[in-house]
Structure formats: C-alpha cells, structure tokens
Image (cartoon, rainbow, N blue to C red):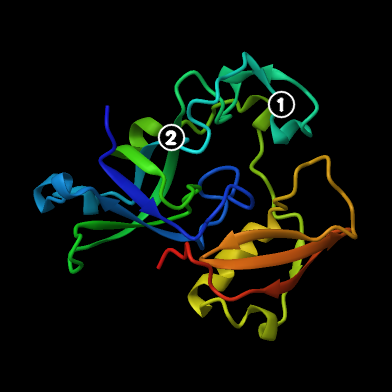
C-alpha cells in the first residue's frame, strides 16, 4: 500500500492530540491528496455523507516494534491489556482509524479537491491510506459494549486563558485549543502543580500548568518554523 493523501492539522506534536476522534469537534483539518489522486471524480458523491473514515499510519512510531500488551491511558497508565484490545500506536501494523465529520470539499485550491474535516485526532502531516464513507445504518451500534472504555472521555479541566495570552493564536483556532486542553493532555501519572508543560499547536508553542481541576495557559510564543498554514 502507499499513501493517497496527508492531513494538515494544528497538532504539531503527539502531546495534546485528543485521544480519540470527535472528542474536540471544534478542531479543523484538511485532507490533501497526493498529486496522482487529485481527482474531482474520485470524490464524486462524497459530499452526501456527514462523516467519513480515515485509515492512516502512525508514522512517528512505525518501525519501533510492538508488544503484546500495552498500558492504555484510560486505565491510568498502570494496567496492562492486550494490544488488540486497545488503539495503541505500537502495533504489528501501525494503522490508525478515525471517524471524522466531513465539513466540506474545497474545489478552489490548486491542490483540490481538499476535504475539510472536524474532530480529527491526527498529527500534522500524517499519511492517509484510504477514505471511506461512514454508513450510519451499518457502522453505528447503539447497544455495543465498550469494555474498559465504555464512556467517552470528559473535559475534566477548566481552562483559564486570558485574551492577551491567546492573542497570537488565530481566533478561529482558539476554541479547538481550549477544547484539547480541557481534556487534560497530561500523562495520567503526572500531577505536579508546579510543572510547566509545552507543546506545538498551529505552529505556536503553548505552555501551561495544571493545579487541581484548573489549567492555566501561561504563554503562547511566536510561530515556529513547522507551522502548518
């Protein structure tokens, strides 16, 4: 197989990426096809679907091997379960699967068609291997059992971010940032109120600290060289 597209997202590094698709619906991303697949015919009829499946590669962990058991964050990072009972990136085949909302198909860019999606949980530049429509009549199972991940992750933190601190972030991206932060991106075993965390978002360096159930954004630096605009 070979990639057919890549994603342009605001998540410049693994830290702070939502742990599942759809957790931060405010996030926006673009699926850009490689030149040989930039065909309006290839996406004909896709605009009739509200959601799509993205099949993609854990490109940053590919080739690092795998273990039969992993420690998922949902279990506090201390309990081991089988890798095939999780969505861990450390798999025999580093394939990811995300259900995202299809917000539109942009036909006016030089690289069109470009798919505009919401709620993606993909690192900027992630290779995409396939795109399929989400079929609610078959893909939705309301009575399904979710094992140790029965309930959806909650936004557990109240984000405190002054306007003057957030001002470098474009206004249309701020709610996505706040949504990602409210989900508590820290590893489950870290709870140091004095620790300052930093990560790249939309080409900016964001720093914050957490005390109790409050997350305070300390600073947002100027754009970095790897900004995805």
Q: CA distance from mark 1 to mark 2?
A: 27 Å
Give residue 88's position: percent from left, percent from top.
Answer: 58, 29
Quarter residue 198 falls in: bottom right
Q: Quadrant of residue 19?
A: top right
Place of residue 29 in the rendered image (x, y in percent of width and height, measured from the top left): 41, 58
Q: Residue furthest front?
A: 225
Residue assigned mark 2 = 140
Q: Residue at x 89, y 53 (%)?
A: 192
Foreground mark, 1 or 2? 1
Q: Residue at x 56, y 18 (%)?
A: 84
Instruction: Residue 216: give x, y in percent of width and height.
Output: 78, 69
Residue with the most extreme bottom position = 164
Q: Position of residue 91 (x, y in %)?
A: 53, 22
Quadrant of the frame with the N terminus: top left
Left or right for 76, reference 104: right
Q: Relative to the observer, which residue lies in front, 88 or 20? A: 88
- Residue at the (44%, 57%) spot, across then down: 9
Farthest residue to the top: give it: 68
- In the picture of the structure, the residue carrying the numbered disc 1 is 71
Q: Is residue 175 above or below residue 124?
A: below
Mark 1 Cα shell of 10 Å, populated few (<14), some (14-19), many (≥20): some
Residue in view at x 63 percent, y 74 percent? 221
Q: Earlier in the sequence, mark 1 or mark 2?
A: 1
Q: Nearer the viewer, residue 192 or 173?
A: 192
Give the left or right position of residue 6, taking residue 212 as reference: left
Q: Quadrant of the C terminus?
A: bottom left
- Residue closer to the observer: 163 or 126: 126
Q: At numbered mark 2, what does the secondary structure look like: helix, strand or loop?
A: loop
- Compared across the picture, whether 80 is left or right of 147 comes to right
């Amino acid at each position: 197989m070979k990639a057919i597209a890549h994603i342009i997202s605001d998540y410049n590094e693994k830290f702070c990426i939502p742990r599942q698709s759809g957790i931060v619906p405010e996030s926006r991303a673009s699926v850009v096809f490689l030149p040989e697949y930039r065909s309006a015919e290839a996406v004909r009829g896709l605009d009739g679907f509200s959601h799509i499946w993205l099949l993609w590669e854990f490109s940053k962990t590919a080739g690092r091997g795998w273990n039969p058991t992993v420690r998922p964050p949902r279990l506090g990072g201390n309990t081991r379960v089988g890798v095939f009972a999780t969505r861990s990136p450390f798999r025999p085949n580093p394939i990811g699967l995300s259900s995202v909302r299809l917000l539109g198909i942009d036909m006016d860019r030089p690289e069109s068609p470009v798919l505009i999606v919401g709620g993606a949980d993909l690192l900027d530049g992630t290779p995409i291997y396939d795109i399929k429509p989400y079929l609610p009549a078959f893909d939705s199972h309301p009575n399904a059992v979710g094992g140790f991940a029965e309930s959806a992750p909650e936004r557990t933190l109240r984000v405190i971010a002054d306007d003057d601190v957030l001002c470098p972030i474009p206004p249309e991206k701020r709610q996505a940032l706040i949504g990602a932060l409210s989900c508590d991106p820290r590893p489950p075993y870290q709870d140091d109120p004095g620790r300052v965390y930093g990560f790249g978002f939309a080409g900016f360096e964001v720093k914050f600290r957490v005390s109790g159930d409050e997350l305070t954004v300390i600073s947002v630096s100027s754009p970095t060289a790897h900004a995805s605009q």
